[in-house]
Image: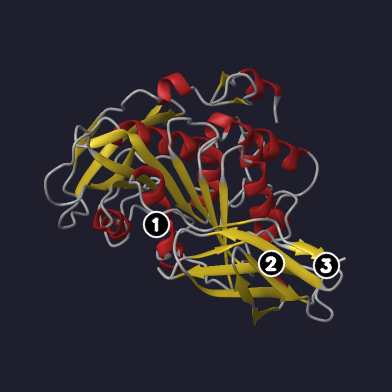
Amino acid sequence: MQIKAMLLLTFCVLGNRDSAAASPWDIERLFQVPQWEKTDVAAKDGMTGLLFDAIPVRGKRVQAFAYYGAPEGPTPEGGWPAVVCVHGGGGTAFDTWVQKWNDHGYAAISMDLEGHYPKGTPTRMENPGLKRLGIFQNYQDPIEEQWYYHAVAQVILAHSLIRSFPEVNSEKIGITGISWGGTLTSTVMGVDPRFKFAIPVYGCGYLPDSDGNQGLAITPGAYSDFVNQYYDGSAYFENVTIPSLWVNGTNDTHFPMPATQQSAQAVQGPATLRFELRMKHGHGPGWNPKEIYAFADSIVKDGLPLAKLSRPEIVGDQVTVSFSCASKVTQSELLYTRDDGAWPERKWETLPVEHSGSTMDATVPQGASIVFFNLTDERGLMVSSEFVPVP
């Protein structure tokens, strides 16, 4: 990165101030409630369309469009819990996503991060921001002129905005993001300590060293060094003490399993994994899992927690995991692959296993190279253990 751009960075200490990493964002400024106004552009029934001021680009005003909604009925004492929803590549502000959270008893905001109104709207934004350029491709530009820098800022500003609404409980707000939004969530969760839970879907940290599309695009050297220092969630995971749920599939082409698991291991708060067999990649598949809403309920609404699984242990040809579950276990299985090589291309197979008391155990299939367990309870909620290599 150019020396001039480096000198422009304003560093702030975040989260756990004893050990927190430094970041290039002006957090004091982003924690202020942004100027905002309602808009009828892209109007949707039951939603409030709004424009809020983001940080300027090259001295020009920038506004971000968002949908906001709260559940129907009287506001509970203390206000509604709430969620900030961060879209992925090709996405925008989604009223459908806001409505899903409303239906689960949460206020929610979903903002566009690339300077346009939702698709199908003929009107162009008067004050658009930056659009994403590949995978951090313009990392050599001044950081204040890079999309990811502004996207992180807009997510934090959206949080500052929603927590200012009188019907929202500012002490019960979480964040979730899908794909690129999951990557942003992985960064923001360590930069904005006001959140109470985080749910990254697909996207995660440790991208430069991964073998998915993201990692393969980030070449070693100055490129990966910049991403690791300023953008990748791993730069800020030491700040994260809130509970997190990491949702991914076994064969995601953008975000391989090791990066997800390493991220879950690196945060300082309790982390839960959910690895779905060949989970499809997209906004719909990313916001549909019931575990997402149950996890949020368990943190801010006194809901039953998801099951917890220990790290599997392999002794001889037997693999064992212990677990705790607040409701009856209805299904348990071992997932395994015999393949090596690129993670997105590995073939995974499943094997039903017995559970007894608080343990599950299975015989390691012949030739298996990696194994992990999935457990499903009577609510239909599934969680995963960490995956482990077979000696």
Q: Is residue 371 above or below residue 135?
A: below
Q: Which residue is mark 2?
A: 372
Label 2: state its secondary structure: strand
Residue at numbered disc 3:
390
**79 and 91: which one is in front?**
79
Residue at figure coordinates x 38%, y 45% from the top left? 115
* Residue 248: image location, x then y, percent: 57, 62
In the picture shown, does residue 163 fall above or below 361?
Answer: above
Counting residues from the start of the chain, the first of labels 1 and 3 encountered is: 1
Q: Is residue 317 visible?
A: yes
Label disc, if present, on residue 376 of the rendered structure:
none
Image side of residue 11 versus residue 381, left or right = right
> From the viewer's perspective, is 80 left or right of 359?
left
The kind of residue tagged 2 is Phe
Locate residue 65, reporting x and y percent: 30, 44
Label 1 neighbourhood size at 10 Å, few (<14), some (14-19), many (20+)? some
User: How far across and how far down the image is residue 156, in percent?
Assistant: 42, 34
**287 relative position to 76: left or right:** right
Residue drawn at x 76%, y 68% as measured from the top left: 319
Label 3 residue SS: loop
- Local packing at callout 3 (Cα closer than 10 Å; few below 14, some 14-19, many 20+) is some
Q: Mark on residue 294?
A: 1
